Amino acid sequence: MASARNGSDASAGPLDRFDASTDAAAVVSANGVVVGWTRGAEELLGCPAREVVGGSAARLLAMRGDPARVAGIAERCRGGMGWSGLIPVRHRDGSSIDVDLRVSASFGVGSDECFLISARERKQQWTVSQSVLEGFQTRSPVGMAVMDLDLRYVWLNDTLERFGGVPREQRLGRRLSDLFPGLQADTIEGLMRKVLVTGVPVTDYEYAGWSWADPHRQHAYSTSFFPLLDADNSVTGVGYMVSDVTERWNARQLLSLVNEAGTRIGRTLDVMQTAQELADFAVPHFADFVIVDLLEPVLSTEGHGAWLTDAGPASATPVLRRAGMSSVREGCPEAVARIGERADFLPPPHDADLLINGEPILIQVLAPSEDLWVAEQSERAAKIREFGLHSLICVPMRARNTALGLTTFVRSLNTISFQPDDVLLAQDLVARAALCVDNARRYTREHTAAVTLQRSLLPHALTGGTALEVASSYLPADPTDGVGGDWFDVIPLSGARVALVVGDVVGHGITAAATMGRLRTAVQTLADMELPPDELLAHLDDLVLRLSEEKTDDEAANRSSTAFLGATCLYAVYDPVTRRCTMARAGHPPPVVVAPDGHISFPELPAGPPLGLGGMAFEATEIEIAENSLLGLYTDGLIEGVDHDMELGMSRLGDVLAQPDSDLSDLCTSAVRQLVPVPQPDDIALLLTRTHALGPDHVVSWDVPMDPAAVAEVRARATRQVEAWGLGELAMTTELIVSELVTNAIRYAEPPIHLRLLRDARLTCEVADGSSTAPRLRHARSTDEGGRGLFLVAQLTHRWGARYTAGGKIIWADQEIP
């Protein structure tokens, strides 16, 4: 350290050592005479310039002269290189001072060659006292050790001795693997050898293990290894430092466990599966045996499905059922109840209030011999003794103010009892699972309600009369995607005709199912009005627009709710007399037709816009279908497939339906199974029909002159035809119906007039005329001479009505065949 005699500032900072402005400097000629002397030099040696300048520089050195060395330095400096080194110099008081001396390259001053010499006192380094070294030995919070080249202990401090629990005298001269078998000794010694070979330190290597100081509890350590070198830089051993980072390690492990729980619990919308996922996840990470017991209403799809925690205890005793369990022992032999069985486990002395208002229970040491366990849980107490269950945490499962059940964590093979910090982790795991269970419970209830609603709205029995043989198949979407809005229907019409409809509502859930029901009802009503397909779709489009504009109170309050957007639909009417089918579609895939010879076709129908867009027209197309052809209507879920290629899907559908001599119901079922082998995100509907024709033996028709006298002749012909068909019981009523309808047509309508009788599932009488005036049923007064014709027809027939054609209208009446 600088002495006061040279004026150095003891408080000078570390930057001063790089400041050359305070260096002592002198200019020396080539013959060793001092020709310049600075104030810094005067302060360093205590010699004023008048005593030094002009004298020999050699007398300032506190060492014997070495002419050869001086000559070598001068030669180097003349070459422009300069020189530096440690030289002792003499102070004016006779003492010696070690200085860092620097000699510059030579330069000329007039005719003389000179050298600039600068010096700085070599500061005395701070030395470590014995007390400081003893602090490393006894008071350092970090364990330290020195290992020799064979990785044997040479020195260690008290902290490391305390960490390991092995006395110092037993460690010295022995290796880590000899003292702590199984403590990753091979890995740690491998790191030490790497340091010995490469000389590169290894820092902050963390590992978990045990020690003799605490053999029954896992600790975590952070270690660093570095090489030890001697004076000639040869490696003489390895030093290492170790810190106990158990708390940090556990916190990180718990955080990782919680994060992992978020990805492994609640992957499905199934209550039982979610409960089992919780149990499987916690074993063996956290516990040796886990049971998840849920309230019976939670597992039910009816009613509210749980207890509300803010409603107070229920009057009835709750029933818990085992929903999930897992154990480190195969088969869960510790369990008293199996999956699905009544569990009713509440640790004594707690009652049902624990589920609603209770806090988690920590029992660090289970005592099955206590009176309460023996009295209330005797069978479980026996299991506790048999399998060594020694510590327990019970956490009530609650979500959204709803009590759901109870989760119990137990340790047996893990000898460490649960600690208060473990309760926090258990709470977090159960809270995550409870939210997933509640979501699954709510979804299950809604999905069940939607499926029930949907199935109640779909037709329970389909009939196409003698015109069509009908089969259908409906496959709900994957439950995780919700119930869709697919529907289909077969609607008998007048004149032995049959209407076929298939549709698909946008969206999933109860809203889609309910909308589907409204549209199906609307189609039935519009079909009963005998509207042609294009007009029916236009009316249906108007209905969808109105539905889209409707807002419930809840939807109005929630701006994020999405209104009903639209639907697709295909509507077709098949006439077995003419074998012609009139079709129109609204954004729906075209039907498939398989002719009797196996030829597959998809009629080219104008696509039409989906329902709900408004302002766009629909077009109808009429095609002729050979008898015994296969006509299929379907929703897009059937043909999308995994590749989402609609054209390829339609081709696959045609190939599947082209199987010869197949039963229609079997063909319908197998087609869906082949085309959709796995659950799909959309509902699937397939409606198959095989067409039949009404031949001449089932249909007769006559032209009727515009002459009232012709009524008698037409009436007689109709009566004879009915008797010829073996329907003599209907001859009289047929005679009255024909008389009234033909008479009205002659009186009030325009030519041409035709009468047609059809014998199908019912006996139908049709009178066509060239007028578009609608008939009107009215109740005649007692004084009226007429006005009772249609009223009489309505009383005598099963149904009657009117439909409009391009040339006028048809009045028809059906009679039930005995």
Image: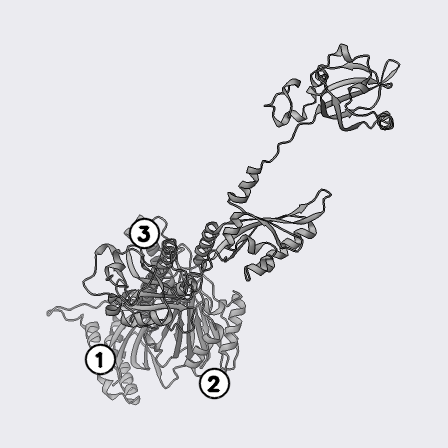
Residue 773 lies, in percent from the top left, at 29, 65
Q: Residue 103 got which mark?
A: none
Vertical placement of residue 464 versus 506, above or below? below
Visible residue check, residue 805: no
Residue at the disc numbered 2: 661
Mark 1 or mark 3, which has the lower sequence index? 3
| Pointers 1 and 3 in contact (C-beta within 8 Å) | no
- Residue in the picture at 55% in, 37% down: 131
Determine whether the residue tagged by mark 1 lies in a helix, strand or loop.
helix
Marks 2/1: CA distance?
A: 45 Å
Mark 2 or mark 1, which has the lower sequence index? 2
Q: In the image, what residue type sits under mark 1?
A: Leu
Marks 1/3: CA distance?
A: 57 Å
Residue 504 lies, in percent from the top left, at 40, 64
Q: In the image, what residue type sits under mark 3?
A: Glu
Residue 261 lies, in percent from the top left, at 43, 58
Residue at the disc numbered 3: 555
Residue 84 is drawn in which quadrant?
top right
| Pointers 2 and 1 in contact (C-beta within 8 Å) | no
- The mark closer to the camera, 2 or 3, is 3
Q: Residue 736 got which mark?
A: 1
Q: In the image, what residue type sits under mark 2?
A: Asp
